[in-house]
Amino acid sequence: MARKAILIDITLCVGCGLCRDACKEANGLPEGEETRLNANAYTVVQDWGNNTFVRRLCMHCESPTCVSVCPVGAFTKTDFGPVLYDEKKCIGCRYCMQACPYQIPTYTWNETTPRVRKCIFCHERLAQGLPTACAEICPTGATIFGDRDELIAEAQRRLREEPEKYVNHVYGLREAGGASVFFLSAVPFGKLGFPTNLPDQPLPMLTWNALSKIPNIVAVGGTALYGLWWIINRRDEVGKLHTKLKEMEEREDGRFAN
Ligand code: SF4
Ligand code: SF4
C-alpha cells in the first residue's frame, strides 16, 4: 500500500465537529463535544475565534518519538504511515506522553490499569481500502485523505496558486522529520497552538542535549529526561546484545553442522 496521509486545510474548516463524531463512532468511543484530547476523544476541533477552527490529532510522525521511547514496543510505525499502539503491550509508563512533541497521547486515568490512547489513523478501514472516518465525513473538504506524495503536491499547489490566502508553510512536512498529517492555514501556526520550534530532523535521532532544548520535554523535569535518555540508550544496548547473541548462536549452529 502506498504511504497514506491526511491534509487539513484550516481555511476550509467550519467547525461542525463531524470529524470528531465520526472518529468516536469508528473507535466505539462515548459521545461528547470535547475540545481537549482525552481517552474518549482521539481528535478534537478547537475554536480559535474569527471563524478559525483547528483539529488536533496524532501527527503520525515519520520518525515518532513515542515509538522510540516506549520500553516495551507498544508503539509501532507502519510502512504505510500510521503509528499504531498495542494496548496489550502497554505498561502505562507514559514515556510516550512525555516524549511526544505535540502532546498527543492521553491516558485512561479512571481505569485500574491505565493505558495510553491516541488516533490510530483508522488503520482497519485503510486495510479495507476505505479513507479515515474523519476525512470521509468532512462536508467541506477541510480534511482529505490520500496518498502522501499526492497530498504534499496538493498542499504545495494550493500555496503556489493562492499565496495571498495562506501562510507559506505546509505544517507537518518538515517538523521533527515530517509526519503523515499536514495542515494549511491563513493564520501563522504559532498563533494556533502549533509548536513552531521543532527541528527538521527526527527527534529520536537527537541526543539528550538536543532533547532538553524542546520546551514540553523540559517541562517534564530532569528525572524524566534522564529516563528518556536511559531508555533510548538502553534500547541500543539491548539491540546490540541481541545481535551479538544471534551471531554467537549462528556460530554455534555452524560448528554443530560441520
Ligand atoms: S504525534 Fe506524538 S503520538 Fe503521534 S506519532 Fe508523533 S510522537 Fe507519536
Ligand atoms: S468535519 Fe471538516 S469542516 Fe467539520 S470540523 Fe471536521 S474538518 Fe472541520
Image (tube, helix red, strand yellow):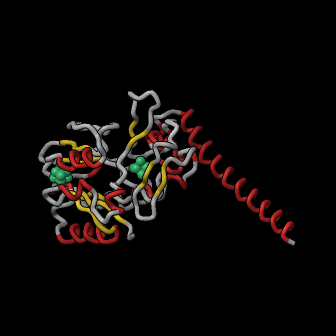
Quadrant occupied by the N terminus: bottom left
Determine the residue positioned at 70% across, 55% down: 242
218, 1: nearer the viewer: 1
Q: Is residue 123 left or right of residue 65?
A: left
Percent position (x, y) of residue 136?
A: 21, 58
Residue 192 seen anywhere in this rendered image of the structure: no
Q: Is residue 114 left or right of residue 189?
A: right
Percent position (x, y) of residue 32?
A: 21, 36
Determine the residue positioned at 22% across, 49% down: 22
Tell me where residue 223 sits by quadrant.
top right
Determine the residue positioned at 18% across, 42% down: 47
Q: Which residue lies furthest to the front in this view?
A: 257
Q: In this view, does 246 lie above or below 209?
A: below
Tell me where residue 142 sits by quadrant.
bottom left
Residue 16 seen anywhere in this rendered image of the structure: yes
Q: Is residue 212 left or right of residue 257?
A: left
Determine the residue positioned at 20% across, 60% down: 166
Percent position (x, y) of residue 183?
A: 27, 57
Q: In this view, does 84 lie above or below 170?
A: above
Q: In this view, does 225 lie to the left or right of 77?
A: right
